[in-house]
Amino acid sequence: MKKVTSRWIPHQLNDEQKQERVRLCRENLAKFRDPGDYSTNKNWIGEGESPRTIVRRRKFERKNLFSIFFKSNGPVIIHAVDNDETIDHDYCIENCLKPVVKEIRKQRKSNGTKGIKLLHDNASPHRHSDVINYLTEEGINIIPHPPYSSDLALCDYWLNYYIKQNLTDQPDEKSLARAVSKLIKNIPEEEF
């Protein structure tokens, strides 16, 4: 006998969901380059050394949330969500999607939103019929995301890691928002 550690998963996927996850992953991998290893918790330690301590936030600790929309040539909108704000489908449309559509039309005067594809996870606001209808009316194609697969969000492959690696401590929320915005706007175009 040996002792093993079980891995916690949020949902037990059925066979159909597993097949859909594999199909969408293969489809997305064909579109995007291999991002490599992005884990920030791995490190080499010498014999007799202790591994570094990873501080985990408490479940209800205040967090700073940013909605970041980008195209293949750089950022479109970087939206800092106000603390204590609930993100529902109305918030998503009014504060995120409408400004994104407006900015895309400004950047692409002749084509507007034609040919624009949006990849977002399966969070409730993203799946709401009002959000889907709004995106459809604007001519934006939604790239399907596998069910219960937040671990496969493409931003997690490189953008969140890049921000964590390059962002310094900030004294308040406004300076954090400015620092995140500046950092993302300074990413070279070929990285997108």
Image (cartoon, helix red, strand yellow):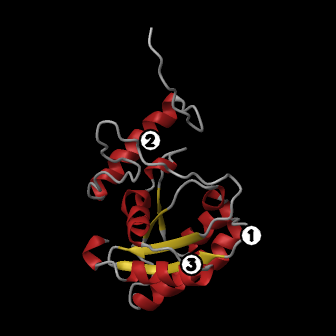
Measure how far apart labels 3 and 1 are at the Cα level.
Answer: 15 Å
Dots 3, 2 in contact, CB < 8 A: no
Q: Position of residue 155 (x, y in %)?
A: 43, 61
- In this rendering, the answer to whether 38 lies above or below 73 is above
As measured in the structure, the alpha-carbon distance from the residue carrying label 3 to the one carrying label 2 is 29 Å
**Relative to 28, is 64 on the left or the right?**
right
Residue 189 vertical placement versus 21 (above, below): below
Q: Position of residue 140 (x, y in %)?
A: 48, 71
Q: Amino acid under label 2?
A: Arg
What residue does disc 1 label? 84
Relative horizontal placement of residue 79, taking residue 154 as reference (left or right): right
Q: Which of 172 and 93 is in front in this view?
A: 172
Residue located at (51% from left, 61% from top): 120
Q: Which of marks 2 and 1 is nearer the N terminus?
A: 2
Where disc 1 sits, the SS reads loop
Which residue, given by chain and number where applicable, does mark 2 sit on?
Answer: 21
Viewer-proximal residue among 23 and 1: 1
Secondary element at image label 2: helix
Q: What residue type is labelled 1?
A: Asp
Residue receiving disc 3: 79
Q: Which amino acid does label 3 sit on?
A: His
Measured in 3D between alpha carbons, the distance from the residue under mark 2 to the one under mark 1, in whole angstroms, is: 33 Å
Q: Residue furthest front?
A: 48
Instruction: Tell which tag, 3 or 2, sits nearer the viewer.
Output: 3
Q: In which quarter of the image is the N terminus?
A: top left
Report crowding for label 3: few under 14, some 14 to 19, many 20 or more residues within 10 A (C-alpha).
some
Q: Residue 98's image quarter?
A: bottom right
Q: Which residue lies furthest to the top in this view?
A: 1
Name the spot of residue 14 as percent of width and height, x first.
54, 30
